[in-house]
Amino acid sequence: MLQVCPNGSRAQGVPVTPDELAAAVRASVDVGAQDVHLHPRDAAGADTMDPRHVAAALAAVREATPGVPVGVTTGAWTAEDPAERAALIRSWTVLPDHASVNFHEDGAERVAETLLDRGVGVEAGIFSGTEAAARFLRWPRAREVLRVLAEVTDTDPETSTGTAKDLLHALGTGHGRPVLLHGEDGGAWPVLRLAVRFNLDVRVGLEDVLTLPDGTAAVDNTALVQTAGMLLQA
């Protein structure tokens, strides 16, 4: 599975408004993206879990790409207090297909359980260099998540694949869930190639990387997705 992550928390050069997100995702789906992870933004351009902005982003993207699963972030930077994040999830009027939960963040289990209780799939975000893997594996509902989102934060192209292997080893296979492995910036393409070798799900987009494998700037999300698709087919 190839997921597109069109914006993340980057401040410039990424789609922000619902219409921009819809256009970016439509173009990415046209060249092979099968799933979406996006960051809804408020009027000031900041990441948000506010139900109005979540609903607007989801509605626009779903209208442009009917049938394609769409997920959102629940990162702690959207609301520091996990109780507030859980309350925001309960207030959503339009539900995403899935949402990422970073298991190194305070209150991750509470946020994830709130999503599950509302019928929203959970992408369990497991960052390298943290205790997230052990914490996730101890969680009684680990086998209920949609997938594990193994996130390699090592941006060195020379060491990122080793970090990725260590992360996969820490996770093991006992959780029984699909794994999406991805890197970022300098580590994005080496880790994506490793994920292809291991037959894992992958993701790419301007949230993760701004350049193509040869180091040239990516014009847009479509160029990144198209390149990833070629690597998947190689």
Image: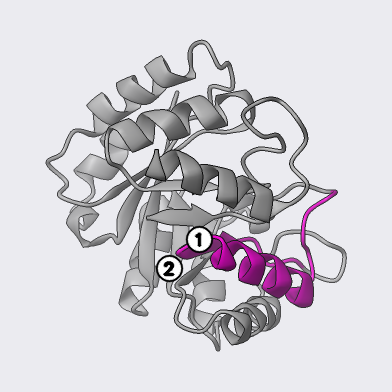
The percent position of residue 46, horizontal first and vertical second, equals: 78, 59
Q: Which residue is drawn at 87% across and 64% down?
A: 44
**Quadrant of residue 45 within the rendered picture:** bottom right
**Residue bearing the label numbered 1:** 33
Q: Residue at x 71, y 50 (%)?
A: 9
**Residue bearing the label numbered 2:** 98
Q: Which residue is drawn at 63% across and 76% down?
A: 54
Q: Is residue 95 left or right of residue 58?
A: left
**Quadrant of residue 62 within the rendered picture:** bottom right
Amino acid marked by disc 1: Ala
Q: Residues within 10 Å of mark 1 (few under 14, many from 20)?
A: many
- Bounds of the magenta span? 12-41
**Can see residue 80?**
yes
**Can see residue 49?**
no
Amino acid marked by disc 2: His
The percent position of residue 106, horizontal first and vertical second, equals: 47, 46
* Numbered disc 2: secondary structure: strand
